[in-house]
């Protein structure tokens, strides 16, 4: 259960598992498998994974080259992607790209041929100011959230605008997922009050909430309150005045959420533990995996600061102050336990492994619907997955010219 502060309570401690050839013996030069430990603690199922279920020669892999590539450096505007939010595949093979830079939903056939577009920039029905999330429903309709207008818009399977609902609240809810009953989960970070005391100096951590809204936009409940980020408060000078502010510590853990039907999956990435809740916030499962934290190296810090300086190179005094505050903020000692969560169309959970700053390689831990660790699936370098089916991975990628692409890869299962 979650208490009023969002802390998870369980009465049984984590049990250490024996592993390795020294304790379990070896088979043909390979370390023996350790079966997951599954136990119950006050109604919460705990799955402790020590080694993958897949044996050598088993497992899944991603094909080396994409079967669909949407994106060109110049030419037909329908294929020029600008700040795409993501890509989804419909049941008939059509691909939908949320092209946030033009506030459009772009529809392509199974080979990547443009079929038509919906939406556009504005505040009218079916228009957007700031697309921040979108998803496919079971009947191939598409829902899109505009964070600026706090509005969820529904488009039918043919891409025609159908209806919209507005979400209440003063803290700008950011929709993160849609449950099977049509309700929405939104992330809310409380805004700092103008009369709040100055930020305390040194390290601290703030929180975020996940709120649930009905299909009609009505607020239903708070799923829980979770740790958000590790921050560092410091004093600085700006425009001749002394001020205080808080910077997010580089490489700090963050809280991520995924939705699978009626299940809500949350990970704070402070440790390799992933929590599964019912829609009303009841903890039902903990998924754990043996994990060694990746240390933050000096090269990670240098790479991070170099990219930040390049990003703000043409900015004014505020940009320079922002860079200077980051330079004075001590980084974390180790990377988060993982970076992101995504649930595929079959209900398997994919967890992306942390990596050094600037490292384009991507690896995914895959867990089945019961939380058993199946194994690792390497992904294409620099590829951000936004949709996974039974036989494909779909997502976004930038080439050497920074041209944005939506790519579809075959997922091969042995």
Image (cartoon, rainbow, N blue to C red):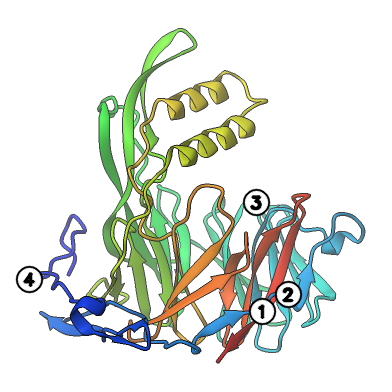
- Residue at the disc numbered 2: 66
- Residue at the disc numbered 3: 129
Position of 250 with respect to 161 (left or right) is: left
Q: Nearer the viewer, mark 4 or mark 2?
A: 2
C-beta proximity under 8 Å, tags 4 and 2: no
How far is the residue under mark 2 from the one under mark 3?
32 Å
C-beta proximity under 8 Å, tags 4 and 1: no
Residue at 46% x, 74% y is 215
Residue at 58% x, 83% y is 389
- Residue at the disc numbered 4: 11
Q: Is residue 302 visible?
A: yes
Q: Is residue 186 above or below residue 33?
A: above
How far is the residue under mark 4 from the one under mark 2?
48 Å
Q: Is residue 125 visible?
A: no
Q: Which quadrant of the view contains residue 23?
A: bottom left
- The mark nearer the N terminus, 4 or 1, is 4
Q: Is residue 249 above or below residue 186?
A: above
Across and down, in percent, residue 19 comes to: 23, 76
How far is the residue under mark 3 from the one under mark 4?
47 Å
- Residue at the disc numbered 1: 63
Residue in the foreground of this view, choosing between 262 and 405: 405
How far is the residue under mark 4 from the one under mark 1?
44 Å
C-beta proximity under 8 Å, tags 2 and 1: yes
How far is the residue under mark 2 from the one under mark 1?
7 Å
Q: Nearer the viewer, mark 2 or mark 1?
A: 1
Mark 2 nearby-residue class (10 Å; few <14, some 14–19, many ≥20): some
- The mark nearer the N terminus, 3 or 1, is 1
Residue at 74% x, 54% y is 82
Q: Residue furthest left?
A: 11
Q: Residue furthest right?
A: 75
């Amino acid at each position: 259960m979650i208490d009023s502060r969002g802390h998870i309570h369980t009465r049984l401690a984590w049990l250490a598992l024996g592993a390795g050839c020294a304790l379990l013996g070896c088979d043909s030069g390979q370390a023996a498998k350790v079966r997951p430990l599954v136990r119950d603690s006050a109604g919460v199922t705990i799955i402790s994974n020590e080694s993958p279920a897949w044996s050598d020669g088993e497992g899944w892999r991603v094909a080396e080259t994409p079967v669909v590539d949407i994106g060109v450096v110049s030419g037909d505007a329908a294929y020029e992607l600008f700040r795409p939010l993501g890509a989804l595949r419909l049941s008939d093979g059509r691909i939908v790209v949320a092209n946030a830079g033009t506030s459009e939903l772009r529809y392509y056939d199974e080979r990547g041929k443009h079929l038509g577009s919906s939406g556009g920039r504005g505040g009218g029905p079916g228009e957007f100011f700031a697309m921040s999330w979108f998803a496919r429903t079971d009947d191939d309709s598409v829902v899109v959230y505009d964070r600026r207008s706090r509005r969820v818009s529904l488009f039918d399977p043919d891409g025609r605008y159908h209806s919209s609902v507005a979400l209440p609240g003063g803290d700008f809810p950011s929709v993160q997922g849609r449950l099977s009953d049509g309700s929405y989960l939104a992330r809310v970070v409380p805004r700092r009050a103008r009369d709040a005391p100055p930020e305390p100096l040194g390290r601290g951590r703030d929180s975020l909430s996940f709120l649930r809204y009905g299909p009609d936009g009505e607020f239903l409940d708070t799923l829980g309150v979770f740790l958000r980020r590790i921050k560092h408060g410091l004093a600085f000078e700006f425009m001749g005045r002394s001020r205080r502010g808080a910077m997010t510590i580089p490489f700090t853990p963050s809280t991520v959420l995924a939705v699978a039907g009626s299940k809500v999956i949350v990970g704070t990435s402070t440790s390799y533990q992933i929590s599964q809740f019912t829609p009303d916030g009841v903890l039902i499962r903990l998924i754990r995996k043996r994990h060694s934290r990746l240390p933050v190296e000096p090269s990670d810090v240098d790479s991070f600061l170099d990219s930040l300086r390049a990003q703000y190179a043409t900015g004014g005094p505020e940009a320079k102050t922002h860079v200077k505050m980051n330079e004075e903020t001590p980084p974390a000692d180790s990377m988060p336990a993982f970076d992101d969560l995504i649930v595929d169309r079959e209900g398997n959970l994919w967890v992306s492994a942390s990596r050094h700053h600037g490292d384009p390689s991507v690896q995914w831990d895959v867990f089945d619907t019961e939380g058993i660790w199946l194994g690792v699936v390497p992904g294409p370098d620099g590829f951000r997955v936004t949709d996974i089916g039974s036989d494909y991975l779909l997502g976004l990628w930038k080439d050497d010219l920074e041209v944005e692409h939506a790519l579809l890869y075959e997922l091969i299962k042995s």
